Amino acid sequence: MDLSDEPRINIFRHAETVKSYRAGEAIFQEGDPGDLMYVVREGTVNILVHGKVVDRIDSGGLIGEMALIDRRPRSATAIASTECEVVPIDEHAFKQLISRVPHFALEVMRIMAWRLRQMNQGA
């Protein structure tokens, strides 16, 4: 999968609410409640489905957005591949971001569409 074209979200470089993870630490697990999505501010996160790495998300990438949007359990596991910092976004903050920064919703949709196209090409 060529990740060079994946859209990035850069409005969180100076966010104050940040969670740090060590390499190998789980950010969330498949089946967990999907009450947060995260923007990767620094580092790399591996996305696993049934224990197999299916994607790698670098700085500026988004993880966990599907579960936040559809309110269903996580469909994948996110593991910090390197030391990383992520910015957690709950549903309330997501709605506020969309109202204050309308292009944020478009960026989230672009990321989701890009990933779907990548999956379809690999199928």
Image: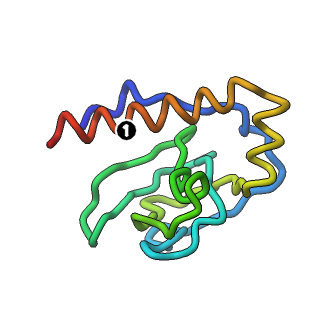
Residue located 53% across and 56% down the image: 64
Q: Quadrant of the N terminus?
A: top left
Q: How is the image coloured?
A: rainbow
Q: Residue at x 53, y 33 (%)?
A: 109
Q: Quadrant of the C terminus?
A: top left
The residue that appears at 19% across and 34% down in the rendered structure is: 121
Instruction: Indicate the quadrant where residue 5 lies.
Output: top left
The residue wearing badge 1 is 115
Along the line of sight, the residue nearer the viewer: 69 or 39: 69
Residue drawn at 17 percent across, 40 percent down: 122
Residue 69 vs 102, above or below: the answer is below
Give the number of marks. 1
Look at the picture and state if 114 lies above or below 72: above
On the rendered structure, is 48 left or right of 25?
left
Residue 76 in the image, given as x and y percentages of width and height:
40, 64
Q: Nearer the viewer, residue 26 or 30?
A: 30
Picture coordinates of residue 71 (x, y %)? 59, 62
Which corner quadrant of the image does residue 41 belong to?
Answer: top right
Check disc 1 and give the amino acid type: Arg
| Above or below, comparing residue 10 to residue 61 in the picture | above
